[in-house]
Image (cartoon, rainbow, N blue to C red):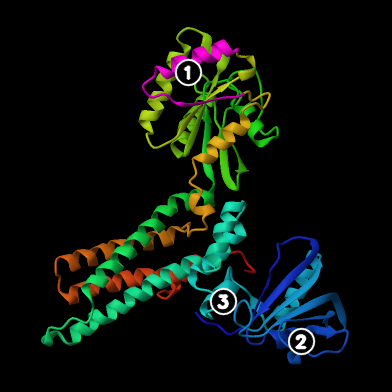
Amino acid sequence: MIKNDSIVALATASGAGAIAVIRVSGEDAITIANSVFKSIKNKDLTTQKTHTLHLGHIADGEKTLDQVLVSIFKNPNSYTGENTIEISCHGSTYIQQQIIQLLLRKGCRMADAGEFTLRAFLNGKLDLSQAEAVADLISSDNEASHQIAMQQMRGGFSNEIAKLREELLNFASLIELELDFAEEDVEFADRTQFHELLNRIEFVLKRLIDSFAVGNVIKNGIPVAIVGEPNVGKSTLLNALLNEERAIVSEIAGTTRDTIEDELVIGGIGFRFIDTAGIRETADVVESIGIKKTFEKIEQAQVVLYLVDGCKLTVDGKLDNLLVEVNKTQNQYPQKPILVIINKKDLLSKEVIDAINAKLATNNQQPTTIYISAKEKVGVDELKNKLLSFVNTGALRNNETIVTNTRHYDSLLKALDEIQKVKFGLETNLSSDLMALDIKEALYQFGMITGQVTNDELLGNIFANFCIGK
């Protein structure tokens, strides 16, 4: 997959802007750029030092296209590990295209998606997990996902895996050495130390695997379904959480026929709120479809906000019906946090609230309850804090390694399985040759994470998801 040709792409977002950056990388990048660049001080780019800036014009023959600033990065001290040129031009889309087309005529080709970062990996500037973190960093839209991507791009995850792999590799070498002297029946690998190492590797792998539950929701946002009967204030609550009029609010029951989704960052964590159609018996075909989607969203959500009208709870039997519905939902989704949100707190007296609480306390499965006024935005901050408490941010605060990549998660699970096989073999005095096979497979899975073991198909799948220019 290693190519030495020169590639070009727009490194900044497409469209008009104040400036745009066009990136060129490859063995002839500086020579090609020099052929179209006219320095205001008559400099030859091929003779300039690395990491220098040069003002001049890009010219197509006698035609000047733009005044630009050219940055030079010589191999191996560049992002890709190759000669790299970055041309900062004015942000007109016409100018961008004219310069790119000129560079293509001079010998460049258009870069594939993620090809600059692919070359950085192939040239040893980044390992595979760090390269994947680049894509996560670009797509990060909240503090937590940004923090995790930065930690992985700096090599935190890679270093942890590399250390485990190196220690296991040392013992694997000793096991292999024993096989060479099988007739002498000698042991080079200290079995006690080996057992301690396997225990340590198992502990670290389990911690990394467990972190994926947190990492996945931080990376993709936590889906929260707002459910309840029609006209209890679901759309008003969504608007209050987002602090904007995102959903239509009406006194007419059944106004929300479809789900409405929007995202909000709370304490650096992304939450995706889903306003659903009110749950009730209806003959309206369109509304029935919306209600069906409501139950689908409950399935997909990680947290359910069960919203009720506090004023209606004073009606005989209404509170009992609520508890039946909440208990049914809790039994159906035992691992899913369900918050009962009692709306219209501003219209409820203290005596009524005390009576509702007393009734709730008699329930065997007393739900977590929060009183709010969606209309007056009372209790909304308390609700946000409660939602944040469902995310285990302890590892994040302690700057521990958190796994967010499904490919890494899969390799960690396979590595753990192989390590446990080796442990079992060690405890049952399995022959060294059979243990060596399981150790090799564990080492293979470690290598898959960092890219020490790879193939063209894997790299193609990973870098195809990158943006052009990165």
Residue 440: image x %, image y %?
Answer: 29, 74
* Earlier sequence position, callout 1 versus callout 3: 3
- What residue is rendered at 38% in x and 59% in y? 410
The type of residue carrying mark 3 is Ala
Residue lying furthest front: 192
Above/below status of 116 relative to 6: above
- What residue is rendered at 52% in x and 43% in y? 222
As helix, strand or loop, the secondary structure at mark 1 comes to loop
User: On the image, numbered disc 3 is attached to which residue?
Assistant: 120
Position of 133 compared to 84: left or right?
left
Position of 32 compared to 121: left or right?
right
Residue in the foreground of this view, choosing between 87 and 177 = 177
Residue in the foreground of this view, choosing between 370 and 97 = 370
User: On the image, numbered disc 1 is attached to which residue?
Assistant: 281
Quarter of the view holding residue 433: bottom left
Above/below status of 356 relative to 199: above
Residue at mark 3 to residue at mark 2: CA–CA distance: 23 Å
Can residue 23 be seen here? The reply is yes
User: On the image, numbered disc 2 is attached to which residue?
Assistant: 34
- What residue is rendered at 44% in x and 50% in y? 213
Residue at mark 1 to residue at mark 2: CA–CA distance: 73 Å
Residue 4: image x %, image y %?
Answer: 58, 85
Above/below status of 226 relative to 201: above
- What residue is rendered at 36% in x and 68% in y? 445
Q: What is the magenta range?
A: 349-372
Above/below status of 127 relative to 359: below
The type of residue carrying mark 1 is Glu
Residue at mark 1 to residue at mark 3: CA–CA distance: 59 Å
| Other residues around mark 3 within 10 Å, as few (<14) / some (14–19) / many (≥20) | many
As helix, strand or loop, the secondary structure at mark 2 comes to helix
